Amino acid sequence: MSRAVWVPERQDIIWINFNPQVGREMRDMHPMLVLSPKAFNDRTSIVIGFPMSTAAYNATNPFAIDNSKTAKQPSYIICNQPKSIDWRQRGATPHPWKRVSDAIFQTARLELNDIIELVTP
């Protein structure tokens, strides 16, 4: 019997270890919103995404998106800290929150574009 191999998909929330870190970067185990598509994640072993936090001070972070509805507790997507991380080497696993809604994902994508201005209107 073959076991299906899990690969993170775009919009998934995964558990991943952000260590090592420096300065104001996220550290330790945290959820991460996956931005990159499954084919890229599988082929490269890299995910591109945003760290997530339940720290209350993020309620006033202008770059944080409230994800409390999905998480059923205070939760924020930290859009000013995009990361590319080797999910296989760091032992990423699916998070119990599973995925963000289409609306939250679109908001996160737009926030990233507002920060780095890749696409102009």
Image: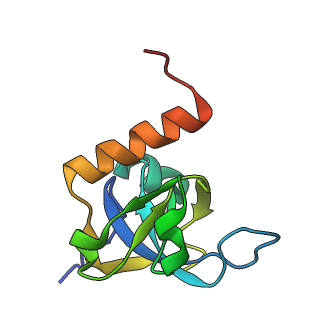
Closest to the observer, 22 or 8: 22
**Which percent across, then down, holds residue 48?**
52, 53
Horizontal side of 29 relative to 31 (left or right) equals right
Horizontal side of 36 relative to 18 (left or right) equals left
Q: Dividing the picture into quarters, in which one does residue 77 lie?
A: bottom left
Residue 75 against residue 86 in the figure, above or below: below
Horizontal side of 16 relative to 85 (left or right) equals left
* Residue, far top: 121
Residue in view at x 32 percent, y 63 percent = 12
Q: Is residue 1 visible?
A: yes
Residue in view at x 55 percent, y 25 percent = 118
Residue in view at x 70 percent, y 79 percent = 19
Residue in view at x 60 percent, y 65 percent = 86
**Which percent across, then down, holds residue 38?**
36, 52
Closest to the observer, 89 or 17: 17
Closest to the observer, 24 or 40: 24
